[in-house]
Amino acid sequence: MVDFRMPSLGADMEAGTLVEWLVKPGDWVKRGDIVAVVETQKGAIEIETFQPGQIEQILVDLNSKVPVGTPLARIRTEAGEKPAAVAAAPPPEAPAPVPVVPPAAPAVERPPVTPPSPPPVTPAAAARARVSPAARRLAEERGIDLSTVTGSGPAGAITYADVERRLGEAIAPPEKKRVPGLDLDAMRTAIAAAMARSKREIPHYYLEHQVDVTPCEHWLAQKNAALPPDNRLLIGALTIKAVGLAARRFPAFNGFYRNDKFEPAAAVHVGVAIAIRGGGLAAPALHDADQLSLDELMSRMRDLVQRTRAGRIRSSEISDSTITISSLGERGVEALYGIIYPPQVAIIGIGKTVTRPWVVDGAIGPRSVITITLSADHRVSDGHAGALFLAEIGKLLQEPDKL
Amino acid sequence: MKQEPIRAEMVEMSYREAVRAALRDAIKRDERVFLMGEDVGRYGGCYAVSHGLFAEFGPERIRDTPLSESGFTGAGIGAAMAGMRPIVELMTVNFSLLALDQILNTAASVRHMSGNQFGVPLVIRMATGAGRQLAAQHSHSLEGWYAHIPGIKVLAPATLVDARGMLWTALQDPDPVLIFENVMLYNMTGKLAAVAGAVDIDKAAVRRPGRDISLITYGGSLWKTLEAATALAAEGIEAEVVDLRSLRPLDDATIMTSVAKTRHAVIIDEGWRSGSLAAEVGLRIVEQAFWALDAPIGRVCSEEVPIPYPRHLENAAIPQTPKIVAAAKAALGRA
Amino acid sequence: MTAAADKPHLSREHMLDLLKQMIRIRRFEEKCAELYTQEKIRGFMHLYDGEEAIAVGIIPTLEKRDRIVTTYREHGHALVRGVPMTTVMAEMYGKQEGCSRGRGGSMHLFDRATNFYGGNAIVGGGLPLAVGLALADHMQGNDLVIACFFGEGAVAEGEFHESLNLAALWGLPVLFVCENNLYAMGTALAFSESETNIQRKAACYGIASEAVDGLDVVAVEAAARRAVHAVRESHKPYFLECRTYRLRAHSMFDPQLYRDKAEVEAKRQSEPIVRFQGWLQTNHIIHPEDVSRIEANIDAEITAAVAFAEAGTWEPVEQLTRFTYAESAMPAIGETP
Amino acid sequence: MSDIDIRKVVQEELNNIAPEVDMASVDPAADLREALDIDSMDFLNFVTAIHHRLSIDIPEIDYPKLITLDGAVAYITAHLGSSKS
């Protein structure tokens, strides 16, 4: 007894649909007789039997799609008629002594080719610590001495992750903390390292300035009245724009102190200190704050706050602020003296809005007032320039419509 | 009596004449060698490279062909398989596209496909590159395409010594060798030793040592790159110029040694940027010398545009010295 | 069938051999079809059923030193030329004992010993190659004939015209054999050629030509003798169009939507084996036991070839890139490459 | 929408802003800014969320009416469907 199987008719044929039987049980067939018709993606093809004998039994009913090799019918070979050597045997494995790869195997298995490990670069280069370009840049920006970093890359090469670990700043790795996506412990050690270094290296001087923000409050109330919540502005947007414009006019407060010299920044990227529920803090940058409209600034700020609190800030946003603003909001205290984020050279503190007796045109009356402070790097600027800078911010906030 | 040092006698010669000398030398030394191509005989060669050879060797060995690039390239392959050493001249790489099937599906494949029963010891020469205002269809630089094909070798002689010396070595090779001669080099003249002969065809050459940056190039762009190196030197930047000479196989060792030393690299390649030979060289540097890099690898390639006819646009389209200088400075962060 | 008079030296033994060669091809192709349905043979496969008379009629008239270039429908040519059936079958299995080390498969059979310069999967791709082989022999003064087989589909390729012109222009000893089986895959001749009389195309290049009934093995052999003699004497190309018909599909995966069943059935009555065997039997030149003896020997040879292929081994993956380039330097002048 | 539904919506939105706070334990009369430690940005997001979910217009001057849980629920119940946009 021999199986008549669904034949493979083409390199890319996996299955066929039997659409017509030309024989029935009991019929005698010769080698080469057409016994059925199979429908394939290319059309109907007549299939022949290579096995002579009598049809014993039909195994597959019409219009059923079956994979190549499925038995379709049984053929009783005549007594004494030796079934053709190959047809009878089930599709034998290729009995090859060499590692057996059945011809039907779609892809010839290849021993895993180890990726070409870079040949050792000539000795001159190898002596120098191998540091990835990305790691070199991060270390330079955060003032990390590479010799204090142990490399985890090939042959001890220092990678970006190594410098990160050294900084104690966890940017990406999600932690078990309540707020998903943020490792508050790692963040705390990173803040500690940055603040300690700032205090060690940067000679801070501090200035304070009282600013009447009543004009801002009136302007905001009148503007927001006509807007749906999505587009309403907060006073924070006004202060950021004012600081941005002032920083543009006073470059000594907008840039980086690196390799023992001050590099003024071409752009004004204002870092906004954002408190993270549960104790974290980050100061991602609002890029080109001086050129954004208030509406644009507000929507970017809302996005930044929302992403920071969800732990999804881009590493580029973390490391390229040119000046930072820290604000404790309405329920904080009146004045806040910040510590500069290295390698920046200034930080603005915004106190809470308080109602104060204030002389306007000779008459005393209640006004909304905030205390704005400046902590600046005395290696780069001095009090006189700081005062002008702070005064400029105060003046800008008197005409909110021009911001 | 003090021996006068025997200075090799030098001859003033053009790149074209150097190639012609190579052809004459090969045809004289091996009767299996013959030149076949459009107008190589009676006309003396489209770029006058084979000028005079027809009179000297006759129509059998300086064989003019009909305009049948696939036909006579296939014939060259067949003749090589049956014992000859043909040199097929495909007038320019632009016309070689008609013979690409024979080059790829027969010449490059037959040894491997036949289980090493048949080889194709054939040399194919073709002019390449832009610069003569021949417009889009006659200005291609496609060496990078051919350097993609396993089974053949690809050469780019940029100097007189290589123009004179690569042919004989290529003819000894049991597998097909393609030689690309940049059209802008034919008229270049210089000194060549009268006894100059065969040179190697698988090593790159450092044409100008330097320490700050590796400028890696080949063929027609070599001389613009050397010019750029001179300009950079005036600004205190010592550029090392590496002439690939062989585009397949690439001489990785020489490339990586240079980059490991200078830690910066710019690749100059007249092909179009996407999928160019420069892309291949660049990635090999990333694979093999990543840890030595101090800046991203730069590339100066042709603009991705069909080469336009007007001179000022053609010049703007293909690599030029100022672009190479700018790319080198950018790589060094001194824009 | 051509009249008996045209067959001056057809000994009984020679006629039996012609019949055996044709049946040998037919049975081999049938076994290949069977093995293909069982996924033992993969890829593309093009069978020679119905065209056997051409290979059997022409190739034996060539000498051992002559060279042959053919196409992907090449099993018949290889078998008649003398490539062992064992290495051909092993090649179809992709085993390294195959005649191309298992790397070529059905469409790329190569054999140096018999100067069999391969099948070619590019329609018309072999013609320039054949011209080149002839050019080398011409330049080296070798007195050879290069037989180049191709289908009528190749006539539409530019390389056909380029090659015929080169061969005529340079006076090269190429025997161009066009196996005109009326269908270029699924395109009948009338849908691809403005001038469907293929033989006439040779005249454009001043090449002597002849058309012959490709289904009559004796007629083909007679024409082949004339052609080969002409090429060897004149060193000029010769064009032989053999009008034939392929009984099976173009390749294995072809529902033959382009022709109807009745046409194929009708042609089965006039296919080369049926005609020649019928003629031999009616003229009492052969007897039934001759045929059964021939078939028994052939079946034994095929069974042995299949066993050889089954027992064959896969080329180790480490050998993958070997022979992309030559491993040894060029042999000295005079040695064969 | 019933009173309980509104309370549930308000609690849900406040929870989005202060996920770590257990809303059930919050004194409905307490100042939400103190209880949940939320700043003006959080409060603006809260008002925006209510505006979208319940299509209620909440002008800035009404903010003080929503600073306790009960206040918010009462205000919303009174102004259901008032949104013009």
Image: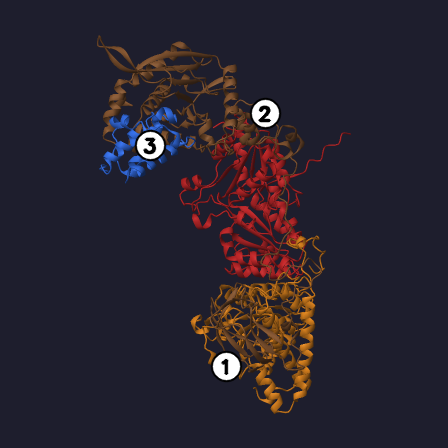
Chain colours: A brown, B red, C orange, D blue
Q: Nearer the viewer, residue C311 or B103?
A: C311
Task: Give the numbered dot on residue C41.
Answer: none
Task: Give the numbered dot on residue A146.
Answer: 2
The image shows residue A85 at horizontal and vertical percentages of 66, 73
Q: Answer yes or no: is residue C270 visible.
A: yes
Question: Is label 3 on the same chain as label 1?
Answer: no
**Front disc: 3 or 2:** 3
Asked if A136 appears above or below A8 in the picture, the reply is: above
| Chain ID of residue with mark 2 | A
Residue picked out by circle 3:
D46
Q: Residue furthest top?
A: A362
**Front disc: 3 or 1:** 3
Picture quadrant where residue A83 is located: bottom right
Asked if A267 appears above or below A51 in the picture, the reply is: above
- Identified by mark 2, the residue type is Leu
Label 1 element class: helix
Label 2 element class: helix
The reply to whether the C-beta atoms of the residues labelled 3 and 1 are less than 8 Å apart is no
The image shows residue B128 at horizontal and vertical percentages of 51, 47
For the image, the number of numbered tags is: 3
Residue picked out by circle 1:
C265
Q: Nearer the viewer, residue A18 or C104?
A: A18
| Chain ID of residue with mark 1 | C
- Identified by mark 3, the residue type is Phe
Quadrant in the picture for the C terminus of chain A = top left
